[in-house]
C-alpha cells in the first residue's frame, strides 16, 4: 500500500464533552473566546457549554490554529459533537 501524507491528518476536532447549549464566550456578555485563524494552546479555554444552568468549560486538546467553528452560539449540542476544527501544523 502507498502511504500518502494527507493534509486532512493535521486537522483535529474539538468535541462537546457533554450535552448542553454551546456558547462562544467564557462568561455571559463576554466576547467570543476564539475566532477562526486564532492560535490556541493545549488546555486553552475555547468555548463553554451550559448544562442545567452550569457553565462548563471546553478546552482545546491540541495546539494549533482554529480553521472552522462548526456550531453557533446558543445552539444545543450533543455529547461528542464536533465543535471546532484545529489545524495542528502550527504556525505560518
Image: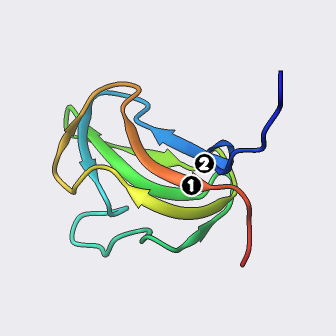
Measuring from the top left, give residue 88's x and y in whole percent. 69, 55
For label 2, count other residues whose C-alpha is less than 10 Å away and answer few (under 14), some (14-19) or many (20+): some
The mark nearer the N terminus, 1 or 2, is: 2
Q: Quadrant of the N terminus?
A: top right
Query: In this picture, is 58 found above or below 23?
Result: above
Measuring from the top left, give residue 83's x and y in whole percent. 38, 45
Q: Is residue 37 left or right of residue 23?
A: right
- Residue drawn at x 82%, y 32% is 3
Measuring from the top left, give residue 52's x and y in whole percent. 20, 31
Measure how far apart labels 1 and 2 are at the Cα level: 5 Å
Q: What residue is shown with label 1? A: 86
Q: Is residue 23 left or right of residue 8?
A: left
**Quarter of image, res 32:** bottom left
Label placed on residue 34:
none
Label placed on residue 11:
2
Viewer-nearest of discs 1 and 2: 2
- Residue drawn at x 33%, y 50% is 70
Question: Considering depth in this image, is 53 or 37 the residue closer to the camera?
Answer: 37
- Residue drawn at x 52%, y 63% is 66
Measuring from the top left, give residue 85's x and y in whole percent. 49, 51
Amino acid at each position: 500500500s502507498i502511504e500518502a501524507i494527507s493534509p486532512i491528518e493535521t486537522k483535529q476536532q474539538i468535541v462537546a464533552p457533554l450535552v448542553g447549549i454551546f456558547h462562544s464566550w467564557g462568561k455571559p456578555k463576554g466576547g467570543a473566546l476564539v475566532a477562526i485563524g486564532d492560535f490556541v494552546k493545549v488546555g486553552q479555554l475555547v468555548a463553554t457549554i451550559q448544562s442545567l444552568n452550569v457553565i462548563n468549560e471546553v478546552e482545546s486538546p491540541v495546539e494549533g490554529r482554529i480553521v472552522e467553528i462548526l456550531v453557533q452560539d446558543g445552539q444545543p449540542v450533543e455529547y461528542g459533537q464536533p465543535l471546532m476544527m484545529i489545524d495542528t501544523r502550527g504556525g505560518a
